[in-house]
Image (cartoon, grey):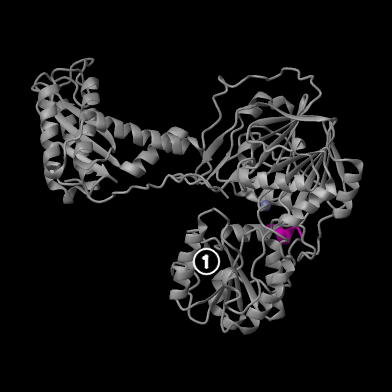
Amino acid sequence: MNDRKSYRPNRQDASQPKPPSAVRSASRGAAIRAQKRSQEDAHRIANQYATAPHPAQAPKRANVIDDRPRLKIIGLGGMDGGGSKNTILVEYMNDAIILDAGNDLGVDLPGINYGIADMAYLETIKPKLRAYIITHGHLDHIGALPHIVPRFPAPIYGSKFTIGRIEEIFHNFGLPMPDGFELKTVTMNENTHERLKIGPFMVELVRVTHSIPGSTMVVVDTPVGRVINTGDFRLDPNPLDHERTDTERLKQLADEGVLILLSESTTTERLGRTPSESTIEQSFIDIMDNAPGRIFVGLFSTNMNRVQMIVNAAVHHSKKVAMDGRSMVSTLEMAVRNGFVRVPKGTFVPIANVSNLKDSDIVVVATGSQGEPSSALVRMSMGDHKHIKLKEQDTVILSSTPIPESGNDALIGNMVDDLMRKGVHVFRHETHQIDGVGPLHVSGHASVDEYKDIIDMLHPKFFVPIYGSYRSKQRHIEIAVEQGIPRKDTVNAENGDVISFTPNSMEITGKVPHGTVLVDQTGAIVSNIVIKDRIILAEEGLVAVILTIDKKTGNLLTSPDIISRGFIYMRDNEELMNAFRIELRRAVTQRYKRVDLDRFKQELREHVTHFLFEQTQRSPIVIPVVNVIGGKGGEKPLTNNGDTNGKTKPEETEELQRRFQQMRAKLLNQDARID
Ligand SMILES: [Zn+2]
């Protein structure tokens, strides 16, 4: 999916700090430079996913009449890697539509679930937006809709299965929708070549094969010419649901003329043709014929045609089927309700009942084919599953391969190791030949010959590769040139590029604000600043020093409290901690009475940062907390040595001191790592 930089530390020396005596003295400058460096690193890593510039800095175009008869196509996402927040805007004068609005699940930042395209540009043309047209129901094409549509309301168009998926993700979305928001969807029939007028555009969906039912190309006839977005596709001659790509219709559309082809580029480096989905059917029948006990199958939760194939094979072998994993069950319910998966009565059993049935009667279809940490299969492999305890004689089939460049290989490897430790028989696609069975997975994406076929079939005037890394889009351009498209009529555009078209010309005429908005597990947006702090915390840790100072004398009332997280284990570093306390005492004695509290805290932070770097070569986040306790003067105690309004009675001072001591005790008790 992505080959971005990870936030995970790549430290050469992560060993324990050297004892103070062994440390050469580092200059103050070195300490400051080190801290700056770790901040810059965090900045750089977090900025791979920076949001667009603030609207105040962005060019404002709202409500300006656009009378240039040019068609503009802008990738707000999806021009920078497969599976990446695919969001393409089609804009003509005073109307615009959005083709797909997906999320990027490949974001590797602490606490982040996915990214979505920044909609700063859409904000500036909001009144133009007429519709969202969706190619298919994978999350990287629909996952941003619950975030974006409430802010920019417009009806969502798609095939029946796609609309079913969209309703499903809105239903399962973690956050409430704004008051008065109503989800408006329009189901289009991709089999009857239904055409709908949306503003100045005529829109049609054309059936294609991929790895989810209801996948379509989107045809948009504009006043400038015809645009076709392939969505994700392959040209499977024999799909499991027998719904082949509607090449007849594509040829008719091509005969009428195609101005622009936006073609998916995920796997343009794979030669030949992707094998048909039907080639894996016999492998499942063979394994079911021979498996001694229960059978567990891991696959992508939306691959309903494959679920149907497994159900058919199970029924053929008189086995029952249980489904496991929330996303799998949710999509299956929708698919059954809409008639995309047909299951004979009595075939499905709840996962909780599996242990009551004979082992040879059971097939479990589960999430976890990518080794996702909380998925059903991983929980089983770790012995943490509520209903399933794996045993020897069980068979696990992984009907998938790792998503390229996702980093999932290691997760899957660990899961397979755990499964094998339990004596389970594991079949993987990668080792199917060694295991003496047929293929267990085929890709949902095309290979080079299929990409060629689409270019030949549609012979567009202009060719724009989309949905892929720069290199796979560049490869796609080479394929197009080989198929006879002049190189000048192709462009490898990036996110934010405005590609402007007339019937005879294509050029990049500008750049609009674009970027990534980060979303956490709850569905909430997370600020880039928070991410930068998290990266520094992850890399360097945190040290808080708590000083309790007598207001009158300026002396420390207690020994300084030091709390650290993710920095060093303090109990193993007593010598350092003792030296640290001496430094803190010295700082209080020398500076506290000479400067105001804010300045003192600032100096303390710098001094501690310098000291810790000198001692450990690390630069944690330092948080100084200074509690000033009122003396005989009886002024308001706690956290401030400045002016206070009104006098505090001695008993109130005592009460506050007592509360502070309690708070301190509580804080220290919570922390097993303080000394
Ligand atoms: Zn897809």
Kindly identify the residue that appears in the image at 70 percent across and 47 percent down. 476
The residue range painted magenta reads: 334-339
Report the number of numbered marks.
Answer: 1
Foreground pick, 667 / 498: 498
Reply above or below: 641 against 33: above
Reply above or below: 486 against 593: below
Kindly identify the residue that appears in the image at 64 percent across and 80 percent down. 288
Give the percent coordinates (x, y) of residue 117.
60, 37
Quadrant in the picture for residue 414: bottom left
Main SS category, magenta section: helix
Q: Is residue 599 visible?
A: yes
Look at the image and say whether residue 12 sits in the magenta stretch: no
Instruction: Name the residue type under label 1.
Output: Leu
Give the percent coordinates (x, y) of residue 675.
16, 46
Give the percent coordinates (x, y) of residue 540.
31, 42
Q: Is residue 386 visible?
A: no
Give the percent coordinates (x, y) of residue 210.
72, 56
- On screen, residue 619 versus residue 157, left or right, reads left
Residue that carries the numbered disc 1 in the rendered image: 377
Foreground pick, 204 / 614: 614
- On screen, residue 535 versus residue 393, left or right, reads left
Quadrant in the picture for residue 488: top right
Foreground pick, 149 / 531: 531
Circle 1 residues within 10 Å: few <14, some 14–19, many ≥20:
many
Label 1 residue SS: helix
